[in-house]
Amino acid sequence: MTFPNTGSVLTTLTQLTQQHRVKALLERVRNISVKEFICLLDFITAEFQQFLRAIELINNEALETMLEDILEVITMKMGQVLQAEHITIFLVDNAKGYLWSKISQANSDKPLEVRLPLNSGIPGHVANTEKSLIVPDAYSHPLFNPDLDKQFGYHTRDILCMPVKSSKGQVVAVIQLTNKAGEQRFNEEDEQEFQRFVDDIGVILESCQLFYQAGRNQRGANALLKATQILGQSLDLEATLKSVMEQARILMQADRSTLFLLLRETNELWTKVAAADGKTMLEIRIPANRGIAGYVASTGQPLNIPDAYKDPRFDPTTDQRTGYRTKNILCLPVYNSAGTLIGVTQLINKHQGSFTSSDEEFMRAFNIQAGIALENAKLFESVLLEKQYQKDILQSLSDAVISTDMLGRIVTINDAALVLLGCPVQQNNDKLHKSSWEQKLMGRLIWEVVPIENLQFRLEDSLKNGANHYVPEQSLTVGLLIKDNYSSENTQDKFTETANQNSQEIAGCKCVLAILDRTNPEYYIPWNETESIRENNQETSEELLPYQIHKDKVRRIERSANLSVKPLTNPDGEVRGGLVVLEDISQQKRMKNAMYRYMTPGVAERVMAQAEDTLMIGERKEVTILFSDIRGYTTITENLGAGEVVSLLNQYFETMVEAVFDHEGTLDKFIGDALMAVFGAPLSLQDHAWKAVQTALDMRQRLAKFNQQRRAKNQPIIAIGIGISSGEVVSGNIGSHKRMDYTVIGDGVNLSSRLEGVTKEYRCDIILSEFTYNLCHQHIWVQELDKIRVKGKQEAVKIYRLISDRSQTLDEETQEFLYYYNLGRQAFLDRRFSQAIAKFEIAQKIHPLDPALNIHLERANMYLNQPPAKEWDGVHEMTTK
């Protein structure tokens, strides 16, 4: 058997293999001599070495420019041979339907890419007809396009244009020669001379394109594999965004790459891109139907745009923001596994030329992987958000909550549970301390560290049988052991005695949970770990603790809690764990819950920070009291059903109590349809009078809105009266620990209640005593009503109608009215009744219906006819409460 030349060896082997004649080849090789076999191996090796060099060339990134270099060499030599001033090789892109080439520019080293429609112009005609064309006078030919001459500052005289075919007879390029040298024009001899090179050029161009495509395929496959590996390892959404598009940019040899995520809830496309400095990250949000990316997102159709600024869909505002210049764009949709569009990939500014149809094919394949990676990342992000959401809910609960697995081992524990066991989690510097407690408790049997009677039995019953248990008033006793730089060499006497310390005020020390030893009530066991357990755990010397601690070395913490034990089930109803909830009902929490009835939680926390004895024993304080009452309540409600009455009061009190709380007041009590609020107790307030007045003005505004809503529903509107006075009272918790009723008592309380009733006589909504007025007169506009002596009181007091605060300027009419009214009242108190009547009558012309004015005018007329006794001091005696 002989192989005549190296070029036929692999061809012969391939033909034999394709014809399933491998056995025949084996038989032929079996009988050849060793010398002939060595010769065969040399032939095959030589051909495979050529293949290896070809594969190296394919894998070489320099292959991208090889086609351009060869085109440049061909055009240069063809110009010399055929004496043409200019030669252009247009490559055919059948998929896109255009011819493209790169033409040198006079004032630039960078060639300009030109794209011509495949069905227009002289090159397009030659590509479609597959026939050469000689044009002796370009400007007179109907297919000639003079725009290119204008663009490049060139004048075309004559043209010789010929098609270039591949080995399979397909047109792969069109070569156009322009302006034959001298005075001659291109002729048939030039065409025949040109024909000598066309077939070779066709093979070269075909080979270059095949090498280029093979190289692209190879590098594309490698890049896609690398991207897939990276994406498969990442579950972080932003990291995925960055890695996805970095791989896409490298693969497509683009300047920039962007992945827009589709936010369906806002119908926006969102991404982060680098600014012109390459460092600053800018968040971009655009409507999902605007711009290039918006068009792809709304239609699902890919876009390959060679010149962005010539496309009407392009939005240049992003360029303006980032300081970047977009030239060409490749934009494709990204779908998830369900076929739903979840984003858009956008590549900008290809390094060499514009994006091709093969670029689109690679990006489609790439986007499939990107869609899977994004879906996984978004799913993982959703899981993390849901987990954090559940954790936040758990930590926000005021009750202690502990979940367990099916064996009763702790899985999660919230801060309230740690506090219940004595961990000082509220200290700012105790984050590590809290973490150490959580690590120590996780995985422990719950009944080992939460010593509640029968907890193990109840939890095991829930885990086994799905039973629910609720047991009120359970006792929980633990110890808090404080150790400072404790090591295995320390002894028990190194522990700090903490019997009188508050666990929430311990700083710089390490707190350890100690559980009462059931066999010996004189001792506690740190973490409830026996010596054998600790030996098996092989803990470090830093964590070693004595087996037993005497009770005198431990701070004893006693709690009272309502216990709930419930099973945790999966969607199928199967028990997958247990839930233990402990509601702390110790005295402090009872007091706090009670305080929440009277004031906002923020105020309650500040009050609770004070000594508890103050609330129980009481103290004298300067405060302001506000009483409010519904006018004509009986008349309003007599035609309403019981449910309507309750609804009316609930809605009314809801908005009025908010006004009290908004101005740091304390709700003392409800008395039927009346409300009593205190400002300055139990939390002291320097501006308690002004706070009370602000509350009254707020209540006035809220009542107006409340009545507006009732009118819209054809419901009867209501009016209220408010009395406010300031003075010293005794405040405290009146009652016992089991039945707390925080309140204030004193003359100031009684006077405020009387002033609320006085509003009926003077037909106004808010009356202040002189004690309140004197404390905040600089903030308010008032009308002095009278000086009265309320029923049950010997001391007279001036009262004022509250007009508004001084943020509102009084109108000129009201100012004039008050001027003459005050002149008349002063004359009235001086017993100059004729002058008083004259001033009152002037004021009456301004506000004829003012109740206080008409009351004083009536009294002045009466005293003018029947003068009062000599001891009369202008005080009006109130005969009713």
Image (cartoon, helix red, strand yellow):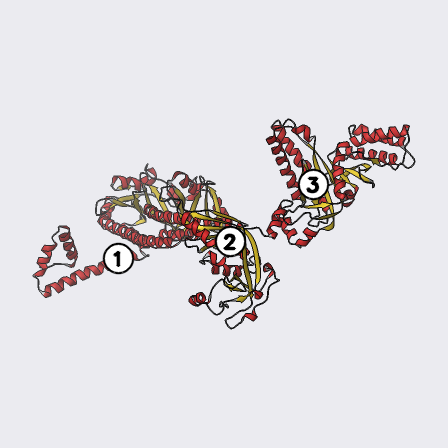
Local SS, label 1:
helix
| Location of mark 2 (residue) | 414
Verify CB contact (< 8 Å) between mark 2 and mark 1: no
In the rendered image, is residue 644 in sight? yes
Would you say 661 lies left or right of 248 here?
right
Question: Height in image: 122 above or below 464?
Answer: above
Q: Position of residue 146 (x, y in %)?
A: 37, 40
Between marks 2 and 1, how big is the CA–CA gap?
Answer: 62 Å
Would you say 409 lies left or right of 708 here?
left
Q: Where is residue 208 in the image (x, y as percent from the top left)?
A: 27, 52
| Neighbourhood count class around disc 2 (C-alpha, 10 Å): few under 14, some 14–19, many 20 upward | many
| Location of mark 3 (residue) | 676
Q: In which quarter of the image is the N terminus?
A: bottom left
Identify the residue shown where x is 69% and y is 45%: 743
In the rendered image, is residue 380 in sight? no
| Neighbourhood count class around disc 1 (C-alpha, 10 Å): few under 14, some 14–19, many 20 upward | some
Between marks 2 and 3, how big is the CA–CA gap?
Answer: 38 Å
Between marks 1 and 3, how big is the CA–CA gap?
Answer: 93 Å
Of residues 809 and 182, which is closer to you in this image? Answer: 809
Nearer to us: label 2 or label 1: 2
Verify CB contact (< 8 Å) between mark 2 and mark 3: no
- The type of residue carrying mark 2 is Asn
Counting residues from the start of the chain, the first of labels 1 and 3 encountered is 1
Of residues 776 and 341, which is closer to you in this image? Answer: 776
Local SS, label 2:
loop
Q: Where is residue 866 in the image (x, y as percent from the top left)?
A: 90, 29
